Image: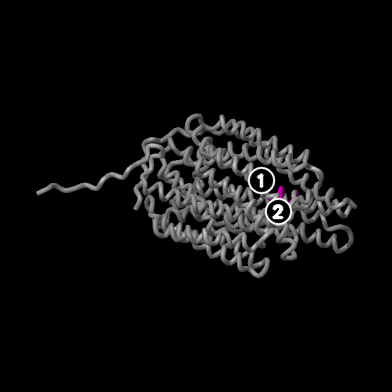
């Protein structure tokens, strides 16, 4: 009688250290993240068309981007808890279902309000997907290969923005803004079906209850701050007269109240998390900030996100409104930079694994800051298109050299039990920084443009002045990242931690 048989060991790739099952899950998560980011990046070029089609202002239209990013910032802190409470499969299906429903609603939206609601639903799904991807990678990928895998994430995070504006420009001129969502919808459905069939669970789950008060405080805190920031530019462009003065006073009051509510409730949120983490029940465990390297990397990401997302939102408006470049040509103009970011991702990841952070972060920070100053000092009402393409491509190179090492070094600085919380913190800071950047830079551009028009400037000159003010703000804000680039280190590899099995 033969002895007992043993199941064959799963085949592990020598390049990544992952089994075939784990590799398939990673690629499914990357595909889903690609769809979500593709959707997020179609709005920048569409804003000018939506202003005309829906009869709204540019400040209102930017809420299609800001509301999306703000919702992510509110939901992402919850994902640290969700990823510990529910299985990988449950979180994936929920995220993709929300994203798919939101995409369908956006395509059919009868007006601006419903469109904003649809963007919020989409953002709820996207908010779950990104931390799920990052936590999964940190959990199953051996430390020595993390840079390479994060390089693949960089491909997704770069190619989607590359395709998004170009696709959006073509769609806007030939099919209409609804088809920006119509093209994404079948891809989202396919990702949902594939994930439902193939995604399995990774790691273990817990049964801790969600703290509802923490969710409310988080929403009020981040919401109040970003809404208040979005009001900054409006007060400068009301013109003269009693009505304009009354409008300016009301807007100043709204700004002040929103910021005060946001700061106070966010402070209460942080206080409550410190209390709850003593019994391991925090919605967002702030012990991740005990790592100095993590804190520095997250701060760097926040500043980069503020400058980057604000700039890539203002740039299409500047090109279309001031230089009168078509939507399709605007999309093509940003394509080389985004493609460069994507194709450089794997190479940058390998350099990180072999050489660490500073060889990438220092030149990346210098290039990014230098290009933002070029934007601020040289872009006028007559700037040639070729100069914009060159500068935007170099800016993308600087960002590519920064994002992969920052993501990897930040999460790699944490213990395994804090990966989900660390991913949530990284995503929250990135989205709040981006939302603040979009809100403030659009508001500043709009306010300065209106003030210039009221002062008798022609439309092109007033628009160029508004863009100059916005780019100058981004350039000034970005200066600290040069210092930060010298301080962030690659964490020591923890080879003793083994990846969990797939269930």
- In the displayed image of the protein, which residue is found farthest to the left? 1
What segment carries the magenta color? 313-318
Separation (CA) of disc 2 from disc 1: 11 Å
Residue placed under numbered mark 2 in the picture:
327
Going 87% across and 55% down the picture, which residue do you hit? 454
Measured as percent of width and height from the top left, residue 472 is found at: 75, 42
173 sits to left or right of 220: right
First along the sequence among labels 2 and 1 = 2
Residue placed under numbered mark 1 in the picture:
334
Q: How many discs mark residues in the rendered view?
A: 2
State the image quarter where residue 142 is shown.
top left
Measured as percent of width and height from the top left, residue 430 is found at: 59, 47
Q: How many residues crowd around disc 2 within 10 Å: few (fewer than 14), some, or many (20 or more)?
A: many
Picture layout, residue 447 above or below residue 477 = below
- In the displayed image of the protein, which residue is found farthest to the front? 174
- In the displayed image of the protein, which residue is found farthest to the bottom? 110
87 sits to left or right of 235: left
Measured as percent of width and height from the top left, residue 481 is found at: 64, 36
Q: Nearer the viewer, residue 3 or 236?
A: 3
Q: Nearer the viewer, residue 231 or 151?
A: 151
Q: Nearer the viewer, residue 23 or 277?
A: 23
At mark 2, the secondary structure is helix
């Amino acid at each position: 009688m033969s002895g007992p048989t043993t199941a064959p060991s799963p085949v592990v790739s020598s390049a990544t250290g992952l089994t075939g099952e784990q590799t398939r899950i990673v690629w499914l998560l990357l595909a889903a993240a690609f769809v979500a980011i593709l959707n997020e990046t179609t709005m920048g070029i569409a804003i000018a068309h939506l202003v005309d089609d829906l009869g709204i202002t540019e400040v209102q239209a930017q809420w299609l981007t800001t509301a999306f990013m703000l919702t992510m910032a509110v939901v992402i802190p919850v994902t640290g808890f969700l990823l510990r409470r529910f299985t990988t499969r449950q979180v994936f299906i929920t995220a993709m279902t929300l994203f798919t429903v939101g995409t369908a609603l956006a395509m059919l939206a009868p007006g601006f309000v419903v469109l904003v609601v649809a963007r919020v639903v989409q953002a709820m799904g996207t908010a779950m997907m990104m931390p799920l991807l990052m936590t999964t990678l940190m959990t199953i990928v051996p430390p020595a290969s993390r840079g390479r895998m994060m390089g693949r994430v960089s491909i997704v995070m770069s190619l989607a923005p590359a395709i998004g504006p170009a696709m959006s420009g073509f769609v806007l001129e030939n099919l209409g803004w609804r088809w920006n969502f119509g093209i994404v919808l079948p891809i989202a459905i396919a990702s949902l079906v594939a994930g439902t069939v193939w995604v399995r669970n990774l790691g273990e789950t817990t049964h801790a209850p969600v703290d509802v008060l923490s969710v409310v405080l988080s929403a009020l805190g981040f919401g109040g701050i970003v809404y208040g920031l979005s009001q900054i530019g409006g007060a400068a462009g009301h013109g003269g007269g009693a009505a304009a003065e009354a409008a300016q006073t009301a807007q100043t009051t709204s700004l002040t109240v929103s910021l005060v509510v946001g700061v106070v409730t966010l402070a209460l949120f942080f206080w409550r998390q410190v209390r709850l983490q003593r019994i391991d029940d925090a919605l967002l465990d702030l012990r991740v900030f005990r790592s100095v390297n993590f804190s520095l990397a997250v701060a760097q990401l926040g500043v980069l996100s503020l400058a980057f997302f604000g700039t890539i939102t203002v740039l299409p408006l500047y090109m279309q409104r001031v230089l009168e470049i078509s939507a399709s040509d605007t999309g093509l103009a940003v394509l080389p930079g985004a493609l460069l970011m994507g194709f450089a991702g794997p190479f940058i990841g390998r350099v990180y694994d072999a050489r660490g952070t500073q060889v990438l972060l220092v030149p990346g920070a210098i290039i990014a800051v230098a290009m933002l100053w070029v934007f601020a000092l040289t872009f006028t009402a007559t700037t040639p298109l070729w100069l914009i393409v060159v500068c935007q491509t170099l800016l993308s190179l600087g960002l590519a050299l920064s994002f992969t090492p920052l993501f990897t070094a930040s999460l790699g600085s944490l213990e395994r039990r804090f990966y989900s919380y660390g991913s949530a913190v990284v995503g929250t800071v990135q989205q709040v920084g981006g939302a603040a950047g979009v809100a403030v830079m659009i508001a500043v551009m709009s306010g300065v443009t209106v003030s210039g028009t009221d002062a008798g400037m022609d439309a092109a000159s007033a628009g160029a002045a508004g863009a100059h003010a916005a780019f100058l703000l981004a350039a000034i804000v970005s200066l600290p990242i040069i210092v930060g680039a010298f301080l962030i280190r690659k964490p020591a590899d923890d080879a003793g931690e083994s990846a969990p099995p797939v269930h």
